[in-house]
Image: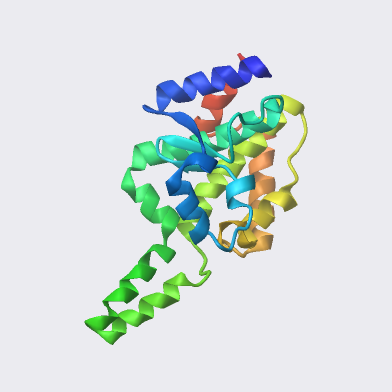
Amino acid sequence: MKKLRKKLEEFMAVDIPGFEIRSKKTRTLMKLVGKLMFFNKKFMTGYITTFYPYVYVPTLPWRLNSHLPAISVLAHEWVHLHDRKRLGPVFNFLYASPQCFAPFALLAFWNLWFLLFLLCALPIPSPGRAWAEIRGYRMTMAVYYWLSGQKVDIKWMVEQFVGPSYYFMWPFRGWLMKKFQKEFDKIKNDDLSPELRNIKNILTQ
């Protein structure tokens, strides 16, 4: 597992120019984001975050002896970095919508109608964020299956979408259960997207 982890990190360093794993604990930007992520109490201590081209972990060294979880997390984050690389700032916009529109409420001094943008600060479903995380968690599910032969708890994944972890980004529990079961069936049948195929080749050859 240790060799596979190193192999994946080496691939990420080549595929994502400037790639680096950094500690949230020592980064002012992450501390600021942590304050904004009031709805996710474990943002600084339990969640991994990407800001292209970096992956931010709670602290370094990170999971020195937990290689399977580390590999699945890194592969998940690679999907986000890969999507950001190919889509550019559009990816950031999709991921942050609709909450990213809330600051426009500051223009209310010019026209009170801008106060309506405050509604965007509410936990409104985010199709863009859900799309990105479905792709990421699909990779998590695939890597865990390839390396352990076991299935990730789909209910746990669904909770990430319907709960506060990502600001209640997609509250449609039944749809998500069916979606992830369908994706798992594809993984078992080796019916893979290009991203999944790429990582499978790295981890199994």
Identify the residue shown where x is 52% and y is 25%.
198
User: Does residue 95 sit above or below 197 in this rendering?
Assistant: below
**Residue that extends furthest to the left in the rendered view of this protein:** 110
**Residue that extends furthest to the right in the rendered view of this protein:** 150
From the top left corner, tell me how far across and down residue 43 is, in percent.
58, 51
Q: Is residue 182 visible?
A: yes
From the top left corner, tell me how far across and down residue 27 is, in percent.
46, 42
Identify which residue, 184 or 64, lies in the foreground.
64
Identify which residue, 46 or 124, lies in the foreground.
46
Identify the residue shown where x is 57% and y is 32%.
74
Identify the residue shown where x is 28% and y is 81%.
108
Q: Quadrant of the N terminus?
A: top right
From the top left corner, tell me how far across and down residue 20 is, in percent.
45, 29
Identify which residue, 47 or 187, lies in the foreground.
47
Does residue 148 appear left or right of residue 43 in this picture?
right
Does residue 114 appear left or right of residue 148 in this picture?
left
Q: Quadrant of the C terminus?
A: top right
User: Does residue 149 sit above or below 23 in this rendering?
Assistant: above
Identify the residue shown where x is 69% and y is 47%.
181
Q: Quadrant of residue 110?
A: bottom left
Q: Is residue 98 visible?
A: no
Q: How is the image coloured?
A: rainbow
**Residue that extends furthest to the bottom in the rendered view of this protein:** 112
Does residue 90 appear left or right of residue 36 in this picture?
left
